[in-house]
Image (spheres, rainbow, N blue to C red):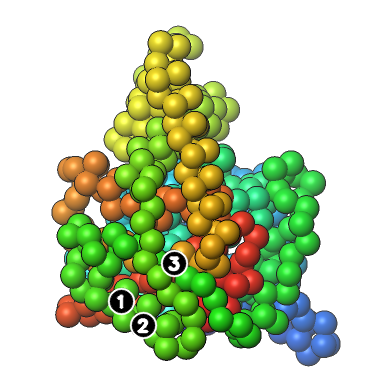
């Protein structure tokens, strides 16, 4: 704990943490130490963990990177967080992220951008940017983030770490501040696949507080980290051929595929005809869900309230106008439009139908293959400010990550070398729902 607190102090310029629980972590370390001596330590004893600022932790602030939750203190702990605490993890602090997890760069945070430790003029990715850079720079051993369309995997790729998005409903969402409820997943960012497997094993499983969570039993992933059979791996042809993907990323992806082939796996190119429809589907449905989820932030019940309000309506308007940042407001407007009575069928219903087609096509893929491989991102970490004036450009960069969330599959990002400037590149594997054991073993 002392080591990590010192490193956090030495790396304040990365803006990875928005709150550090120094005294509490030291005290916890003593308690865990005593348990170790008594031989009663949990499976995560000694793991120093950071949590993204969207996870509730009783009696601690949480504000989803937003001004609108200024001063808000949680009254309960997220199930996923409680389960790791029960295994004696030590929580060292709360990590920077894009406001309400909307973004790919951590630039949409009320706390300012986090920075990539490989090049501090560049983004760490997002929305779990602080969580990824904290692991990259050794400010904690592991982090818990959330992934609605890539927010664990993309920053993990930009920061040379492992990022796991579990199957939808594998991990309880109780205590996770909602962005888009039918897409949101809590997932770990770690230095090794083994740590990701261990955290998932502990966080996963039924929870009486989340009726959507699966009751399927959670396999012992950490005992199955070695592959004992050849797998059938299909890779997205676009990922290694498309001009839209950096040449160095295409090259590194090909090399990773060659290594898998050399190890005896079947590796074949596939075309995914619906690929171009996945992003529009994702952005229509997630903004629709977000506009509904974020209606609870009205200046009455939580956090920020505009002092300039004169009546109830102006209280709502002014609190929301001041409290939300540009990107969140943009998405509330987009989502409200998609759900409005004259456009509902043309946008929301249509997107739901397309979501089903994408799901069917993905299911068909997994009848022939065990895993889908692709790059995680079309580029390496970009410069802070480079894309912030062009939201569409930023959305398009989510092309490889959103499919897993649209269909609910698990996916993982693992480090796959660097470009000529030493910037990290990720490699993505995706599996059929609840096939995390294969996914983790292959990633390992
Ligand atoms: N970049 C994507 C978005 O902005 C993903 C965010 C996420 O996974 N939370 O929606």
Mark 3: give few (<14), some (14-19) or many (20+) Cα within 10 Å.
many
Residue drawn at the location 78% of the way across and 90% of the way down? 37
Question: Which numbered circle lies on residue 234?
Answer: 3
For label 3, being within 8 Å of ligand 1 is answered: no
| Disc 2: which residue | 258
The x, y position of residue 363, in whole percent, is 56, 52
Q: From mark 3 to mark 1, how far is it between C-alphas? A: 12 Å
Q: Nearer the viewer, mark 3 or mark 1?
A: 3
The x, y position of residue 251, in whole percent, is 24, 76
User: Compared to 223, does 367 lie above or below?
Assistant: above
Front-lying residue, 209 or 62: 209
C-beta proximity under 8 Å, tags 2 and 3: no
The reply to whether residue 434 is in sight is yes
The x, y position of residue 215, in whole percent, is 78, 53
| Disc 1: which residue | 254
Q: Secondary structure at mark 2?
A: helix
Q: Which quadrant of the view contains residue 125?
A: bottom left
User: Compared to 303, does 405 lie above or below?
Assistant: below
Mark nearer the N terminus (2 vs 3): 3
82 displayed left or right of 160:
right
Residue drawn at the location 22% of the way across and 60% of the way down? 242
């Amino acid at each position: 704990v002392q080591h990590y607190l010192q490193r956090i102090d030495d790396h304040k310029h990365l803006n990875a943490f928005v709150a550090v629980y120094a005294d509490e972590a030291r005290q916890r370390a003593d308690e865990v130490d005593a348990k170790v001596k008594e031989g009663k330590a949990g499976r995560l004893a000694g793991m120093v963990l950071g949590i993204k600022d969207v996870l509730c932790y009783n009696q601690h602030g949480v504000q989803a990177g937003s001004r609108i939750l200024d001063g808000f203190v949680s009254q309960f702990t997220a199930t996923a967080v409680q389960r790791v605490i029960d295994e004696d993890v030590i929580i060292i602090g709360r990590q920077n992220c894009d406001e309400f997890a909307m973004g790919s760069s951590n630039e949409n945070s009320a706390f300012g951008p986090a920075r990539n430790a490989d090049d501090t003029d560049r983004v760490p990715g997002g929305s779990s940017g602080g969580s990824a850079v904290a692991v990259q720079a050794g400010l904690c051993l592991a982090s818990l983030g959330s992934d609605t369309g890539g927010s664990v995997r993309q920053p993990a790729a930009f920061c040379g770490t492992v990022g796991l998005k579990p199957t939808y409903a594998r991990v309880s969402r109780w205590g996770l501040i909602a962005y888009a409820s039918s897409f949101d997943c809590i997932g770990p960012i770690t230095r090794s696949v083994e740590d990701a497997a261990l955290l998932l094993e502990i966080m996963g499983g039924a929870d009486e507080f989340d009726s959507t969570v699966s009751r399927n039993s959670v396999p012992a992933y950490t005992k199955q980290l070695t592959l004992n059979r050849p797998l059938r791996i299909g890779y997205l042809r676009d990922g290694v051929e498309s001009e839209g993907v950096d040449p160095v990323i295409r090259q590194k992806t090909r090399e990773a595929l060659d290594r898998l082939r050399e190890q005896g796996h079947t590796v074949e190119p596939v075309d995914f005809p619906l690929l171009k429809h996945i992003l529009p589907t994702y952005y229509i449905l997630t903004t629709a869900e977000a506009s509904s989820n974020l209606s609870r932030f009205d200046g009455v019940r939580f956090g920020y309230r505009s002092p300039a309000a004169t009546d109830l309506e102006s209280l709502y308007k002014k609190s929301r106008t001041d409290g939300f940042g540009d990107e969140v407001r943009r998405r509330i407007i987009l989502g409200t439009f998609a759900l409005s009575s004259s456009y509902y069928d043309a946008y929301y219903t249509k997107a739901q139908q397309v979501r089903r087609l994408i799901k069917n096509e993905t299911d068909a893929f997994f009848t022939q293959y065990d895993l889908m491989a692709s790059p995680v991102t079309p580029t390496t970490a970009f410069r802070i400010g480079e894309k912030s004036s062009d939201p569409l450009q930023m959305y398009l960069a989510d092309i490889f990550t959103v499919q897993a969330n649209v269909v609910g599959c698990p996916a993982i990002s693992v480090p796959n070398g660097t470009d000529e400037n030493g910037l990290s590149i990720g490699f993505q594997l995706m599996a059929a729902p609840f096939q995390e054991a294969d996914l983790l073993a292959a990633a390992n």
